[in-house]
Amino acid sequence: MENFEEQLRNDLHQFLLSMKEVDERMPECPDVEDKWEEIAKAYIPDGIREFQDFPSASLGWMMYIGMAVAKMWDTEWEIYSKIEDLYAYMRDKRGYDAMDEYIREEVLLLQGMDYTVLEKVTGECASRVYNALMHQRLEPGTKEAFNGYVACLHQLYLFGAAMQLNRMGYHMTKMN
């Protein structure tokens, strides 16, 4: 599964790099990365329930969550870092089905073309990851299938955060 996650990372990185959504060097933001496990544990029951009928949403929502956490880190981390269940906090604003809209409108404050472009980019990333997962030919309901799904979510979360950090002007450059 480690190799699969590395393949996902490379594919998403190249795709997002070609769209100038991320830099060559990925950002490091330990506060956001440290929230991953807690968010994943809270998200997975909802994500798995939705995966069968709405795989792109089940995957793509995690990318939005990564973006939201990066934005929260940049604005009011003293407050947001203390929220016990950050995932539930976001989900419960409008419900699971509208979480993408909530994040784009009220967390990222997007509208018009920026709103639409982000929806398309996120949808494409979710589709790419879903396609890669299906090509693994993992038997549904197995530990391997679960680990594959979690690997997808993990990379989407990290790349969501990386995209948002990039959009906010955080760029990783080599220091001389």
Image (tube, rainbow, N blue to C red):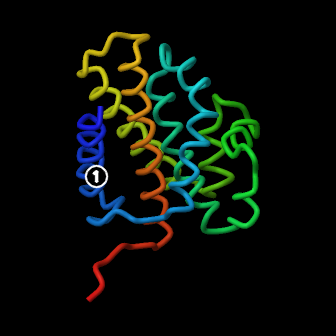
- Can you say whether 60 is above or below 34 in the image? above
- Can you say whether 90 is above or below 174 in the image? above
Residue at x 23% of width, y 37% of height: 3
The image quarter in which residue 38 lies: top right
The local crowd at label 1, few if under 14, some if 14 to 19, many if 20 or more residues have their Cα within 10 Å, is many
The image quarter in which residue 40 lies: top right
Q: Quadrant of the C terminus?
A: bottom left
**Mark 1, residue position:** 13
Residue at x 35% of width, y 20% of height: 144
Residue at x 72% of width, y 58% of height: 80
Q: Quadrant of the N terminus?
A: top left
The image quarter in which residue 131 lies: top left
Q: Considering depth in this image, is 141 or 67 the residue closer to the camera? A: 141
Residue type at mark 1: give it.
His
Horizontally, is 94 left or right of 121 in the view? right
Horizontally, is 19 left or right of 145 in the view? left
Residue 127 spot, x, y in % from top left: 35, 31
